[in-house]
Image: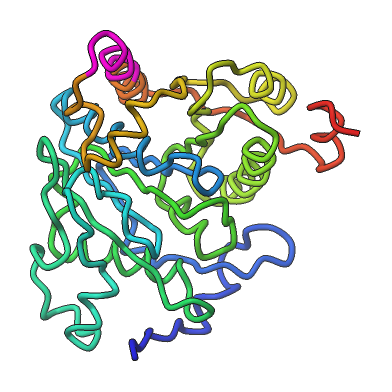
Amino acid sequence: MMEVAKIPVTSIGKGRPDGAGSVQVHQEEDIKITGAKVFAVYGKGGIGKSTTSSNLSVAFSKLGKRVLQIGCDPKHDSTFTLTKCLVPTVIDVLESVEFHSEELRAEDFVYQGYNGVMCVEAGGPPAGTGCGGYVVGQTVKLLKEHHLLEDTDVVIFDVLGDVVCGGFAAPLQHADRALIVTANDFDSIFAMNRIVAAIQAKSKNYKVRLGGVIANRSRTTEQIDRFNEAAGLKTMARFDDLDVIRRSRLKKSTLFEMEGGPEIEEVQNEYLRLAANLWAGSDPLDAVSLKDRDIFDLLGFD
């Protein structure tokens, strides 16, 4: 059975608190990411974060940037369309050397994907044990030990579902901007509101700020627009509910490898536009999460 290294008690609930009653995993000072622009992608489970992250990574690479994508999900399928396979996770390779990280080489856990995007799957502890924040911290530590972040322009964290506990909020401790993927429906927006609250808490003590919303699988955005206005958010990009996007996943391909005429070209251009705007620097949003009851009232539920 896999052994998960225990988190020292000193790393929990000490240092700078992240809100009243918070018990969070605090990253060591020496494993902070410096030099690269760091984005953390959040959203409701199944909303298309991995598809969004992978195509955004490719878009950055098409702009000539050196990109690293880090999947933070036990399914370890964030980089699937980039590498065309499920690559071993950091936890997998650490277990193989009995957690003696000094025995690892960079090629043991970093894989080159489409158009040169570097791909890492952090993985996660077995269900009900360990902490996702520890896994994220160990991943960044390994990358720094192997000097892989020194030659990187953009880092994208693709984060598990809408879980915003201390562990899976850990990428927010590294990110410059948090991006929220949502659809034009109540459940996605409800999850987005919880993520806004988590980012609010982290922004008190870390540099992370809200960058904006990515509307996915959305022919219209009236519900998203209503919430954005109430919460102080804005939509940075919109992607329609297109079959070619669904098929790209089945074909183990990014959208930049798919053929489909003007339709697919429009999607590619939207990703390129989003990447260019993020690289140029997006203004931080001073958003405020809503009370649950207020969301029901706002979106027309009785």
- Residue placed at 27% from the left, 66% from the top? 141
Q: Quadrant of residue 24?
A: bottom right
Q: Quadrant of residue 88?
A: bottom left
Total marks shown come to 0
Residue 148 vertical placement versus 289 (above, below): below
- Residue placed at 15% from the left, 37% from the top? 66
- Between residues 8 and 78, which one lies in front from this camera angle? 78
Give the x, y percent position of residue 213.
53, 28
Q: Quadrant of the N terminus?
A: bottom left
Q: Main secondary structure of the magenta part?
A: helix
Residue 31 vertical placement versus 196 (above, below): below
Query: How is the structure coloured here?
Result: rainbow
Specify start and end residues of the magenta stretch as a single range.
260-270
- Residue placed at 66% from the left, 16% from the top? 222
Q: Quadrant of the C terminus?
A: top right
Give the side of residue 133 with respect to residue 204, left or right: left
- Between residues 17 and 85, which one lies in front from this camera angle? 85
Is residue 56 part of the magenta span, yes or no? no
Residue 37 vertical placement versus 100 (above, below): above
Give the x, y percent position of residue 62.
16, 25
Give the x, y percent position of residue 290.
77, 37
- Residue placed at 13% from the left, 26% from the top? 64
Give the x, y percent position of residue 217.
49, 27
Tell which residue pokes out farthest to the right in this image: 302
- Between residues 75 and 129, which one lies in front from this camera angle? 75
Give the side of residue 147 with respect to residue 137, left or right: left
Q: Quadrant of residue 147?
A: bottom left
Tell which residue pokes out farthest to the top in this image: 262
Give the side of residue 236 with respect to residue 149, left or right: right
